Image (cartoon, helix red, strand yellow):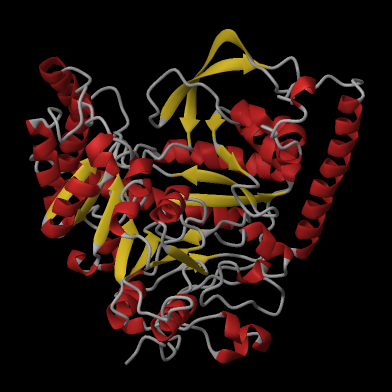
Amino acid sequence: MTESSANKLLNGEACHRTANGRKASKNGFVKNHCLFQQPHKYRRPREKNQNVTHNSSLYKKPFLESFEETPLLVAVLTYMGYGILTIFGYLRDFLRHWNIEKCHVAREREEQKDFVPLYQDFENFYTRNLYMRIRDNWNRPICSAPGARMDLVERVSRDYNWTFEHTGKVVKDVINMGSYNYLGFAENTGTCADAAIEATQAYGVGVSSSRCEIGNLDIHEEMEQLVARFLGVESSMTFGMGFATNSMNIPALTGKGCLILSDELNHASLVLGARLSGSTIRVFKHNNMQSLEKLLRDAIVHGQPRTHRPWKKILIVVEGIYSMEGSIVRLPEVIALKKRYKAYLYLDEAHSIGALGPNGRGVVDYFGLDPKDVDIMMGTFTKSFGAAGGYIGGKKELIDYLRCHSHSALYATSMSPPVAQQIITSMKIIMGEDGTALGANRLRQLSENTTYFRRKLREMGFIIYGNDDSPVVPMMLYMPAKIGAFGREMLKRNIGTVVVGFPATPIIESRARFCVSAAHTREMLDTALEAISEVGDLLQLKYSRCEQPLPSLGWMSEESLLQD
C-alpha cells in the first residue's frame, strides 16, 4: 500500500521521516520542535521544502516534540551490524542446506517440491538468522496482574532461543515499564476488581451470542450510554476486540470510489481496515500537514483516476498517540484541513483516551476541541481502562448505521460481562462519578510521572522521541546487538521493558519503549532510571548531542497554510 519507512531511510529520507516543523541545526541534529518557531537563521535552506509551518492561533499552549536525528557514526555502524548479521545468515543457511547445521524451521517436503510453495525461504531469512538471536526478549510469560510490579516465569533456552523450558522459578517484583497500564486500573484488587467479580456472579463470564441476537445485556447498553457521555458525543457502540474495531468498521464506512488518507505510521489495524474496504488509499507523511493538504487538494482537483469523477467520500485516518513514536497528532490542524476541504475524520484514540487531557477524555480534551468536529471517534479499553475491547463514537445516525452494517456487530460474540463492568467502573472513577477524587489524582499522577521520566532521560543523555506529554517514551538503541542486550540487562536489574526493532521500526531506529503509569511511584521511577542509566553506560547508549532549548513565547510564529 505504501513505501515502508525502512525504504525511505535507505532512499535518503532519514531526517525527514518525522519532520514537521523541526529544523536541523548546523551540528547535524534535529532540535526539539515547538509550536512557536525559531527565527530563519536556524534553518538549513535545503530542508525548507521538507518542513511545514503551523498556525499558533489553533493551539492554546506550546506543542513540544523531540525527534533528534540519528548520529551519522551510529547510523553507519548500525547498517554495518545488519550487514554482518546478513552475511553470517547466508553462511548458516549454506551450512543448513548441506545438513552441517541443524535446521529448526519449517521447510518444504521433497515430494511437494512441484507444488505451490507454502514457505518462502527468503521471507523467513530475518526470522531464522536475526530475530532468533534475541527472541528471548519477547513473549515472556507473567504470572501476576500486569500492574506497576509483576512476577515473571523464569525460562531458559538450550538451543539458542529456538525453544524454551520453564525452570519452575518465578522472578518476583519486576518493575513493569512496558504495559499500557496508563492509569493503573490493570489490578486484581480494588473497586474495579470487586465490581467485576460481582458482574461475574450475576451474568457469568461468557454471553454465547452476538449483540443482534440474544447477547445484548443491560450492562452493555449502560456501558455504551456512559461511553457516549464520557466522549461528549450523541451515541456510541462497543466491541469485544480493539483490533477488530478498526479492521471491521472501516470497511463498513468506506468502499469503492472512496479515498482514505492515512498517516504513514498508522497502526496495523487501521491499515488492514483500509485495505479491506476496497477504497483508494494514499499515505501522507507522519503528522505533516503540508503533505496532507497536498493530497486533499490533488484529490479534489483531479478526482478519481481515469474517470476524474469526484470522490464519493474522503476519509482522513489518524491516531491520537502514535505508539512507536510517542508523538501526538496535530489535531487542531487536521480538523482545520478537514473542514476546509469537506472531508471526514476518523480518529483512533487507542493510546490517548484516558491518558491525555485534563479530564482524561483523550486528545480532543487535550487540545480543548469540540468532539463534534471529529466525525468518527474510535478508541480501545485495553490501555487506560485495564479491560478489553473498543468503541466507536459519533452521531446517532452513524452508530445506527454501524449496528446494521458492521461485521463486528453482526458476527462477533458480545463483550464479556465482567469486562464491561470493569470499563463502567473505571470510567466512572475517571469522570469522578464514584464520589471520590481517585480519577483526578490518577490523571495528575500520570502527567507528573510522564514529565519527570522524560526529563530525567534527556538529562542523562539519551535520545528519546515524541511529545513531552506522551506517556509512551521511545528511547533509541539503534544497533541490532543492543536490542537484546538492553532487554536482558534490564531484566537482570528487575526492570521489565519492551524492546522493538525492524520490521516494526525503520532498520536503523531500533528502540526501547517505556510506558509510564499512574501506578508508578517516584521511587519506582528512580529505580528504573538508575538501572537505565547504568545499562546506558554499559552499552554506550547515551547518544544525544543536543542541549534542550527552553520554550519561549518570544519566538516568532510563521504564517500558516491553514489561514484563510
Q: Quadrant of the N terminus?
A: bottom right
Q: Is residue 130 visible?
A: no
Q: Position of residue 65 (x, y in %)?
A: 48, 66
> Which residue is nearer to you in this view: 346 or 356?
346
- Residue 239 sits above or below residue 421 on the image: below
Say which quarter of the image contains residue 158: top right
Which residue is outermost to the front? 114
Could you tell whether 522 is left or right of 463 in the image? Answer: left
Q: How many marks?
A: 0
- Residue 215 sits above or below residue 26 on the image: above
Q: Is residue 172 visible?
A: yes
Say which quarter of the image contains residue 160: top right
Residue that appears at 89% across and 20% down = 99
Could you tell whether 313 is left or right of 66 in the image? Answer: left
Residue that appears at 22% across and 24% down = 193
> Which residue is nearer to you in this view: 58 or 13?
13
Residue that appears at 45% across and 85% down = 555
Q: Position of residue 234 (x, y in %)?
A: 11, 57
Could you tell whether 313 is left or right of 229 in the image? Answer: right
> Which residue is nearer to you in this view: 398 or 117?
117
- Residue 561 sits above or below residue 440 on the image: below
Q: Position of residue 277 (x, y in %)?
A: 39, 55
Q: Position of residue 203 (x, y in %)?
A: 13, 20
- Residue 257 sits above or below residue 497 on the image: below
Residue that appears at 58% across and 50% down = 475
Q: Quadrant of the C terminus?
A: bottom left
